[in-house]
Image (cartoon, helix red, strand yellow):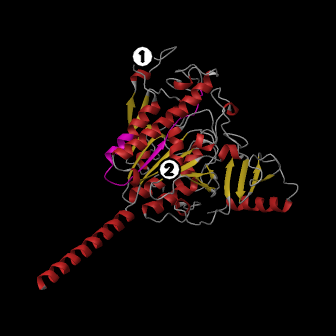
Amino acid sequence: MNFLENTIRTLVRCIACLCFSLMLLNQTQAAEPPNIIYVMADDLGYGDLGCFGQTVIKTPNIDQLAKLGMRFTNHYAGHTVCRPSRLVLLTGQHTGHTPISQNEQYYFPEGATTVTSLLKEAGYATGGVGKWALGPPESTGVPSKQGFDFWFGYLDQGNAHNFYPEFLWSNEQEISLPGNKVGPQKRVSIERETYSHDLLTQEAFNFIKHNAKKPFILQAHYTIPHANNEGGRATGDGMEVPEYGEYADREWPAPEKGFAAMITRLDRDLGQMVKLLKELNLEHKTIIFFTSDNGPHQEGMHQVDFFNSNGPLRGYKRDLYEGGIRVPLIVKWPGKVQAGTTTDHISAFWDFLPTACELAGIKPPQSIDGVSYLPTLLGQPQTPHDTLFWKYRGKVALRSGKWKAVQTGLKKPFELYNLDTDIGEQNNIAEQHPEIVAQMKQKIVESQSAN
């Protein structure tokens, strides 16, 4: 009997030790910071995705991200054009506090604090591909001097509008693409041409593979569906893409075939990225963000209304109406973000820095405008922003709850909209609510004061 009792006691102790070890392992795994992938399209509209109402352009893989994650319907870009929007994303400050508020030349000074530099200090491997608009070659603003272990793509913003460039950059090394060199009329060799988006995707996947055993952040700042403002050379229009794919036989203008094909190509690569994460057993360890840098463009002969690219919103790129700044945001994190959910939480690009910091288990800087939306992602209650602010040249806009104030020029009157009842900003009610307009004007002044 004593032998039996001792054996039972030993087994109980072993089981208890095993349970305790498993509990500690689970706690360790729960505390392990996730990989972060932030995918940003260029000039993709609020209405260009199936999960946001698009009925013609096919985006099955991005729609699947939304089905398995959370869709934000009140998310805003940092700006209505490229460079300042990216600056807001990286610094966590809106354009009332950033050095620029339009597409003027700017590059980061030495020692700038960005979401990338902060996560690098926290032990993350940091990588990026695509368009970099915040530091030309041999400046302090190049990605390798701003927290990126690896960068592949464009450094100059203007070059990023050519999808068959003669070279790209791997950190600070120029990578020649000889097949893309052009003669007086056309590229030298069709067989050797390289579509830059495909190369960016390849390098993004390589970064994931090389850093699969440690926490990483990958920022894929893709360049499609931006127009080639010099006119497309691949398809004879301003929407440059190797082939039209399933849209080739549609009775559409060439630019619209190109626009749709670019988005579907991007969608294809998002599907391949998720597949890669599954193969590497990283899917549950990785949170994916998908968004756009501003509203849809009307360039390269593409027309915003052709596919209803801005959905129910008024305006498009370069406007401070909703169509120029409200963008899709989808976040997928299996086991953490409830699948198939939608939130109307009001958020913006400047919230990504504190969100990423909270995911990494570090404190963000105090001098930022952003607020982490991780509580929303985890299904927890969250206090919304008091205000969101944008400025672009002589234009300003401010959102405060349901109210949106817009001034389209320095000498133009303020417009006021109730976004709860008028998402399309069709009914200017400024004259009916002078007290609200006065409050909004004051908040605009306060949004541009010292942080």
Asked whether, in this view, residue 123 is left or right of residue 3, the answer is right
Asked which secondary structure carries label 2, the reply is helix
Give the percent coordinates (x, y) of residue 223: 52, 36
Q: Quadrant of the N terminus?
A: bottom left
Residue neighbourhood size for the residue with mark 2, other residues' Cα within 10 Å, grouped as few (<14), some (14–19), many (≥20) = many
Residue pushed farthest bottom? 2
Work out which residue is located at the far top of the displayed protein and give it. Answer: 185
Q: Which residue is mark 1?
A: 189
- Residue at the outermost front position: 1
Q: Is residue 126 left or right of residue 327?
A: left
Q: Is residue 249 left or right of residue 165?
A: right
**Residue 72 location (% of width, % of height):** 60, 52
Residue 43 coordinates in the image, percent (x, y)? 60, 38
N-terminal of the two: label 2 or label 1?
Answer: 2
Give the residues in magenta.
205-229
- Check disc 2 and give the amino acid type: Leu
Q: Is residue 210 magenta?
A: yes
Quarter of image, res 94: bottom right
**Residue 233: which numbered mark, if any?**
none
Mark 1: secondary structure = loop
Which residue shows up at 53% across the image and 25% down it?
A: 246
Where, quadrant-wise, is the C terminus in this rendering?
A: bottom right
Residue at 53% across, 33% down: 264
Q: Residue tagged by mark 2?
A: 68
Q: Nearer the viewer, residue 66 or 90?
A: 66
Question: Can the viewer see residue 154?
Answer: no
Reply yes or no: does residue 266 show up in magenta. Answer: no
Q: Quick check: 335 above or below 302?
A: below
